[in-house]
Image (cartoon, rainbow, N blue to C red):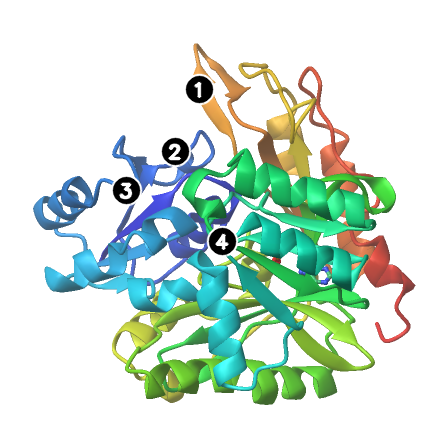
């Protein structure tokens, strides 16, 4: 069969890599893809929000299944557009994606279904929001309502910082309409964890646990990024906690959506804060996380097409999703200056040597071909991923591979997965 993957980052490279091993797949297309993906898939230059062109591609190339990576096409209703044309797609419908695209919808939904989340209030008026922040005091969290590329959340340590964030979002309109309303939220303390599951709207199958690192510098310093690395398993998610997350978060979410007439098919991701052994939801994503996908798919033993087809046909309960025992660690290499300003077009060397090391997977994120070279073309450039018998072995191998790769200005964290090594249950 033929499969189309939409997106062009590290997550999509990992999806394409996994699909390439499927016994069902003859050909993979990727729109738009990147230099690494181009080695195993045909990259097509169609924008990921150009649904008409994508559907035409699927029709003319006889593509059987489409898998979507990024949030933007999901929140614009790519699943609805494909399903209307009778095309199979692994993506939730627009009504379901509100869980991610509208923080107000998501908070109100959680309140309706008693899903544990921080106390909050929604404001459309700057003055009311400011009064409330001054009354509550710090620490306090300010969130723009809509999608702001991960930058619309401020965890304010002081009231002044919170008020400054309100001004930027509501008065200066830093994120445009995404800041029409803000959520002012209680600040939760604890350890963060990610939880991802496959679901066909009826059956929910948790993936192996994983955790990302969001801050740009070691020891979780510096600004938030799209993700500087990730590892799997994450010791913070114990078996007991997994049961709690399923009962208190995943099941009430999927069944709650059903009660409201929305069938959720695809991947549901919950960003959690673990406080005194209990999960609290910080946010939902309606897709695989990036970079968590890289170590998680590296551990998936089952054929991804079997899983995708079972979701699409609503028979996920019929299959068993199997995982490898190995651990996996992904270290993200970024352009110097990211997440602020950075230069593109830097020649990347050492890719072949790194890829030649055992148990190493080089997932490209922001790369392209230029002349005969592979060059950088985004903030996050590569997700160097390695597997090993435990986190320590995977981490060592990942950093060995990282040491082979160079481009001008390259930056990466030196402490990816250290958090897991500190835990006592691995
Ligand atoms: P979100 O996009 O809602 O996940 O927020 C991004 C990041 O902000 C999270 O990963 C947390 O680190 C932090 N955050 C969000 N909400 C809260 C909260 N209520 N309490 C503490 N930290 C939070």
List the residue tagged with mark 2: 38
Using the numbered discs, state the Cα–Cα distance from disc 3 to disc 2 in whole angstroms. 20 Å
Disc 3 versus disc 1: nearer the observer:
3
Asked whether the beta carbons under mark 2 and mark 1 sit within 8 Å of each other, the answer is yes
Secondary structure found at label 4:
loop
Please tell me which of labels 3 and 4 falls first in the chain.
3
Q: Residue at x 60, y 50 (%)?
A: 127
Residue 27: % across, % down: 27, 48
Residue 258: % across, % down: 34, 84
Using the numbered discs, state the Cα–Cα distance from disc 3 to disc 1 in whole angstroms. 23 Å
Is the residue at mark 4 in contact range of ligand 1, meaning its CB lies under 8 Å from it?
Answer: no
Q: Residue at x 73, y 34 (%)?
A: 402
Q: Nearer the viewer, residue 323 or 183?
A: 183
Using the numbered discs, state the Cα–Cα distance from disc 2 to disc 1 in whole angstroms. 10 Å
List the residue tagged with mark 1: 369
- Is residue 283 depicted above or below 258 in this figure? above
Secondary structure found at label 1:
strand
Please tell me which of labels 4 and 1 falls first in the chain.
4
Q: Specify whether 277 is left or right of 43.
A: right
Please tell me which of labels 3 and 2 falls first in the chain.
2
Residue 198: % across, % down: 45, 73
């Amino acid at each position: 069969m033929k499969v189309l993957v939409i997106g062009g980052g590290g997550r999509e490279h990992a999806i394409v890599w996994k699909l390439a091993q499927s016994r069902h797949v003859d050909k993979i297309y990727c729109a738009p893809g990147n230099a690494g993906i181009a080695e195993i898939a045909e990259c097509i230059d169609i924008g990921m929000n150009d649904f008409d062109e994508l559907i035409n591609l699927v029709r003319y190339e006889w593509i059987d299944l489409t898998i979507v990576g990024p949030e933007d096409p999901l929140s614009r209703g790519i699943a609805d557009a494909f399903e209307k044309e009778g095309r199979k797609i692994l993506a939730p419908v627009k009504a379901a994606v509100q869980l991610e695209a509208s923080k107000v919808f998501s908070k109100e939904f959680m309140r309706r279904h008693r899903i544990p989340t921080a106390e909050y209030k929604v404001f459309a008026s700057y003055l009311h929001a400011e009064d409330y922040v001054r009354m509550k005091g710090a620490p306090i969290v300010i969130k723009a309502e809509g999608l702001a590329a991960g930058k619309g959340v401020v965890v304010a340590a002081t009231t002044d910082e919170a008020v400054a964030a309100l001004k930027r979002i509501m008065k200066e309109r830093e994120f445009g309409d995404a800041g029409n309303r803000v959520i002012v939220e209680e600040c939760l303390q604890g350890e963060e964890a990610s939880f991802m599951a496959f679901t066909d709207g009826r059956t929910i199958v948790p993936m192996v646990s994983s955790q990302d690192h969001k801050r740009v510098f070691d020891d979780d310093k510096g600004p938030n990024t799209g993700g500087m690395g990730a590892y799997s398993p994450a010791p913070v998610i114990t078996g007991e906690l997994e049961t709690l997350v399923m009962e208190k978060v995943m099941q009430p979410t999927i069944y709650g959506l059903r009660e409201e007439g929305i069938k959720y098919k695809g991947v549901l991701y919950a960003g959690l804060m673990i406080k005194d052994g209990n999960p609290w939801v910080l946010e939902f994503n309606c897709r695989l996380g990036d970079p968590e996908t890289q170590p998680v798919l590296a551990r998936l033993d089952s054929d991804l097409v079997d899983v995708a087809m079972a979701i699409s046909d609503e028979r996920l309960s019929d299959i068993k999703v199997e995982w490898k025992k190995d651990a996996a660690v992904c270290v993200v290499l970024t352009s110097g200056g990211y997440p602020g300003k950075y230069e593109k077009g830097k020649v990347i060397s050492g890719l072949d040597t790194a890829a030649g090391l055992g148990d190493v997977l080089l997932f490209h994120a922001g790369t392209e071909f230029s002349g005969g070279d592979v060059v950088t073309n985004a903030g996050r450039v590569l997700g160097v991923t390695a597997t090993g018998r435990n986190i320590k072995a995977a981490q060592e191998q990942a950093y060995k591979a990282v040491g082979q790769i160079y481009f001008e200005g390259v930056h990466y964290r030196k402490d990816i997965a250290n958090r897991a090594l500190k835990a006592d249950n691995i």
